Amino acid sequence: MQRPSRVMVVDDDAETLALLREVVAKEGYQVETAEDGESALRQLDEWQPDLVITDIHMPGMDGLALLAAVREKTPDVLVILLTAYGSLKTAVDGIKAGAFDYLSKPFVVDDIRLVVRRALEHKKLVRENRSLRDQLRDRYRFDNLVGSSAGMVQVYKLVARVAETDSTVLIYGESGTGKELIARAIHANSSRSSAPFVAIDTGSLAETLLESELFGHERGAFTGAVASKKGLLEQAHLGTCFLDEIADLSPVMQSKLLRSLQEREIRRVGSEAPRAIDVRIIAASKKNLKPLVEAGTFREDLFYRLEVVTIVLPPLRDRIEDIPLLSRYFVDKFGRTKEKPVTGLSPETISLLTGYSWPGNVRELEHVIERAIALTPHPIITPEDLPETIRTTTVHDQARARGWDTLEDMEKNYILRVLEAHHQDHGQAAAILGIHRKTLLRKLRQYGQG
């Protein structure tokens, strides 16, 4: 059975220490306290907390110094800073130095619970993702696949199973979901990994060019064919050929591809002599092929030959929990190339990224992070570094555009109705709502009513 998460609270004020201990312990976490940074640091190795909550202003070692020491000693331990309103800039500097978040004094109990829960859930997600990737890396080379959502875990399992076979694979997924990455992972973990992996976008070439690219041609087969050339299927002999956007193949090319797959041979353009090939085919499409088969625009016999094993990649909007992991992966990928490296993202930035719908999926997220790293003057990516469309367009906006109220809208409307029914009596309304009066006042300020 897994132990409860451990939280260490550090503050030189006894009342604050007691309050935080009580709130955190009621959430089911194990709690240890320390009255200064030095004693917290001494307990760190022995107690091994998952999260440290520390005041910034303490005698001796202050919170920022403790943050730096924790980051150096145990970089996996998350840190939340406690700050008075007047020292907000110091807290922001702490975020830039690697703190997970900060809490402002005087505290709102609900805020404490929310921030602690979010930090520990993030820690758990990162731990599970790392564990899964370590297990996969032991058996498979999935180094470029990032994500621990339920949908992606199912994809990993399918990739692992099908890689050990020689079956044809059909990958479905919207543009930018990483279909070629999945195809490369299958190839890299197959018995064909030492042979070529050849990729072609079948929808990007005219039919005459595509035939030559796929099957090759002999010298003089057409104007400009000054020498014989191997086609991609022949180049992939003993390896894997990845055919992207297979739905865009013309009926003629569908017929020729089917014949090659059935007979396991190709004929170069301008030649009647067949050439034997041993190639594994992985095809991909952003369109569902079944309706195309029913409409008569895609050959049924080719469809069944391709759809031996099907892998469906979820769009990024359906695996929101992977966005922080992917974002940090791209920060690691691009951030080190700058003279002053970019090492992370602010919590506000993560919030905006997870609230966006990502029509371009992982590819769009990668480009956004790369752009932000190029533009930011800071060591962390802040909301100002993101494109305006992401700063102003959220999932909430899209839900409202479809005529649906968000939970946030419903909560606001309900609170305002209760207040109106009780003549703006904050105390009575808070009691009816089951929340603290301070929480009610904070929400009203958010609504522009305070």
Image (cartoon, helix red, strand yellow):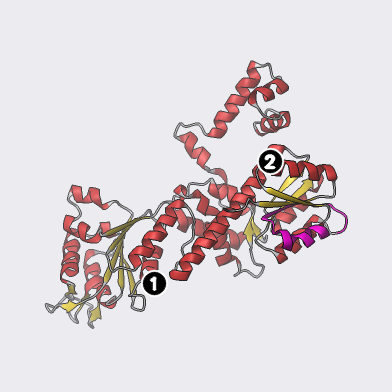
Image x and y of residue 256, in percent: 17, 66
Disc 2 residue type?
A: Lys
User: In front: mark 1 or mark 2?
Assistant: 2
Label total for image: 2
Image x and y of residue 185, in percent: 40, 67
In the picture as drawn, the residue positioned furthest to the front comes out as: 1
Segment tinted magenta in the rendering: 38-60
Mark 1 Cα shell of 10 Å, populated few (<14), some (14-19), many (≥20)? some
Disc 1 residue type?
A: Ala
Could you tell me which residue is drawn at 24 percent across and 69 percent down? 209
Residue behind mark 2 = 26
Q: What number is the disc on residue 216?
A: none
Could you tell me which residue is drawn at 73 percent across and 37 percent down? 108
Give whichever of 210, 169 is nearer the camera.
169
Image x and y of residue 3, in percent: 62, 53
Q: From the viewer's perspective, is 61 left or right of 114?
A: right
Could you tell me which residue is drawn at 19 percent across and 52 percent down? 297
SS for dot 1: helix
Give whichever of 229, 50 is nearer the camera.
50
Residue behind mark 1 = 188
SS for dot 2: helix
Could you tell me which residue is drawn at 47 percent across and 32 percent down? 404
> Would residue 44 be visible to someone looking at this image?
yes
> Would residue 179 be visible to someone looking at this image?
no
